[in-house]
Amino acid sequence: MSDKPIDESVVETDNEKRRKDLASDFAALGESLGRRGIDIDAIVEKVRGFTVAVPSWGVGTGGTRFARFPGPGEPRGIMEKLDDCAVIQQLGRATPAVSLHIPWDRTDPAALKEKAASLGLSFDAMNSNTFQDHPDDPKQPLSYKFGSLSHADPAVRAQAVEHNLDVVEFGRAIGSKAITVWIGDGSNFPGQADLSRSFERYLEAAKAIYAGLPEDWRLFSEHKMYEPAFYSTVVQDWGTNLLIARELGEKAFCLVDLGHHAPNVNIEQIVSRLIFARKLGGFHFNDAKYGDDDLDAGSIDPFRLFLVFNELVEAGDALERLHPAHMIDQSHNVTDPIESLIRSAGEIRRACAQALLVDREALRGHQDENDAMMASECLKRAFRTDVTPILAEARRRDGGAIDPIAAYRASGYRQKVATERPASKGSGGGIV
């Protein structure tokens, strides 16, 4: 029996107001899909089975390079972060796991496991941090200003390796099975770093981390085109990421962050290629307008999100064998983080549901006949379908809220924690 951060009566009361309308909308959509040969209940069950992890840092307010404007009731530590994550899961029923970040979330592992279990949560992939300095950590006295795993100084590289192995050990203690390695290494000026030697040093260090993985663990390497390095980035694209995964071994995979690509890059094609290479490790879901904005998933380009899921559904058994990890990774500067994460989880499920509606037999026929218009229409028909009743019914069947953001606002949770948690101070700059 898990603790509920929001009284169940709040959810029940809000659901009761919406139950009749949902039943009507669900029946109408079911009839419409039935004419297309689609069983709506089968889609609901598949949606119920799709979950995505939330990042522990995501329940706090983010920031820009210029300033950070804290919101009311921000969590002060990992235990309060878990409380907020439990709200997202209680209402949305799509996020049963949390991804931790070390050293931000370091505490007693036994207490952490007990807290998570009391809230009905588990732990997803661990995240290390060698992209900023840690002056209060005696294990990391050296600076990462000029890199970490690819640093010219072997002592810095060794420190970064040990930090990642320490994160793995912490993860083992709380039941995690994977580590995500993202580094900010790169250069801002031509000639600042040797492009070949930097990559070779990175591979050597990554192999040391890989060698320390438990037998049942996976390593996810994440690529990022730019930032904080604006001339060259050591792990800058999916091709380099694939090279790394193949160099390291069978337990190494590529993580695709939807916001970490150049404008107009065909991300769904990258996903297809990584599935073919048997190296798709998973996703960090978010959205972007100009660059790596880390906006709410589906807020800018929901069609692209749908196209990514179209490739995942199309892959079938090949994808199942990979067991990709799914996690949200976004920054919240002007919204309540809990509301944004609830909505993002719902939008990710929306793309999944829409992709499940694609008539694959018809699509392949149009493709084989080179009928570009009808092949496109086949995808568009699924994308245009309003699957909101499916998402709401999936939540209702799992004991969640029909309209989770409305139920959240009705609960008064944000106002409650705002009185319990001291206000955070703003900052003059910095992304976090």
Image (cartoon, rainbow, N blue to C red):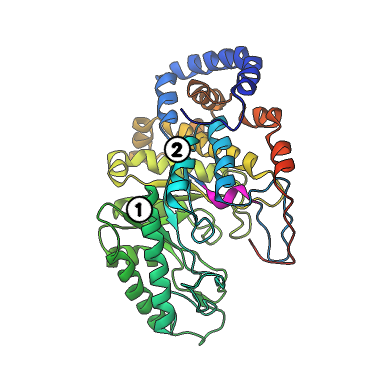
Q: Secondary structure at mark 1?
A: helix
Magenta-tinted stretch: 55-60
Residue on which the image places disc 2: 117
Name the residue type under label 2. Ala
**In screen coordinates, is 133 left or right of 123?**
right
* The magenta stretch spans residue 114: no
Horizontal and vertical percent position of residue 380: 51, 35
Foreground: 316 or 286? 286
**In screen coordinates, is 379 left or right of 66?**
left
Foreground: 130 or 175? 175
Q: Secondary structure at mark 2?
A: helix
Depicted 183 relative to depicted 83: above or below: below
Horizontal and vertical percent position of residue 165: 37, 65
Residue on which the image places disc 1: 172
**Circle 1 crowding by C-alpha within 10 Å: few under 14, some 14–19, many from 20:** some
**In screen coordinates, is 270 left or right of 16?**
left
